[in-house]
Structures are given as structure tokens and as C-alpha cells.
Amino acid sequence: MLTGATYVGTYGDGLRDKIEKHIDRLAAPPPSKVIKALPVPGDGPKKRRGGKRYVSLSLQTDLSSHP
């Protein structure tokens, strides 16, 4: 026999309520995702990065000197 045990069942009732709340929270549907607006298309030309191909292309079309 356990000393200090409650025979009324209040601990068990509290535990049951806690478990039921947890199960209800798990069974609930997930929160809806926020739909974000798309960015404005075509904010001007893209910035081109340098490289061998770009320099050689600009050498063919441009008259200025490149390294």
C-alpha cells in the first residue's frame, strides 16, 4: 500500500485531462501557410557578371581595350 496516495482520483482525472488536451492538439489541422505576393517582374536588365566569355564577347562587339 502506498502512503500518501489519494483514493479520490483527482490525480488521474488531471492526468486524463492533460492527455486529452495533448491528443486534441495533435489531431488539429496544421496552421495555414501565409501566401506571399510575388515580386514585380522585370525591374530592368540583369547585371551581368564578368568572366572569360563576357570579356571575349565584349571584345568582339566593343572597340575599347580590355585586359
Image (spheres, rainbow, N blue to C red):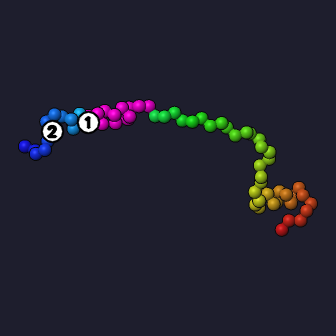
Q: Main secondary structure of the magenta part?
A: helix
Q: Is residue 46 above or below residue 60?
A: above
Q: Position of residue 40 (x, y in %)?
A: 73, 39
Q: Residues within 10 Å of mark 2 (few under 14, many from 20)?
A: few
Element assignment for label 1:
helix
Classify residue 41 by image quadrant.
top right
Classify residue 43 by image quadrant.
top right
Residues in magenta, as a range: 15-29
The amino acid beneath tag 1 is: Gly
Residue drawn 30% across and 36% down? Answer: 18
Location of the N terminus by quadrant is top left
Question: Label 2, on which residue?
Answer: 6
* Pointer 1 with pointer 2, Cβ within 8 A: no
Relative placement, left or right, of 10 versus 42 is left
Location of the C terminus by quadrant is bottom right
Question: Label 1, on which residue?
Answer: 14
Determine the residue located farthest toward the right in the rendered image. Answer: 63
Question: Disc 1 and disc 2: Cα gap in Å?
Answer: 13 Å
Q: Residues within 10 Å of mark 1 (few under 14, many from 20)?
A: few
Residue drawn 79% across and 57% down? Answer: 54
User: Looking at the image, which is closer to me, 61 or 15?
Assistant: 15
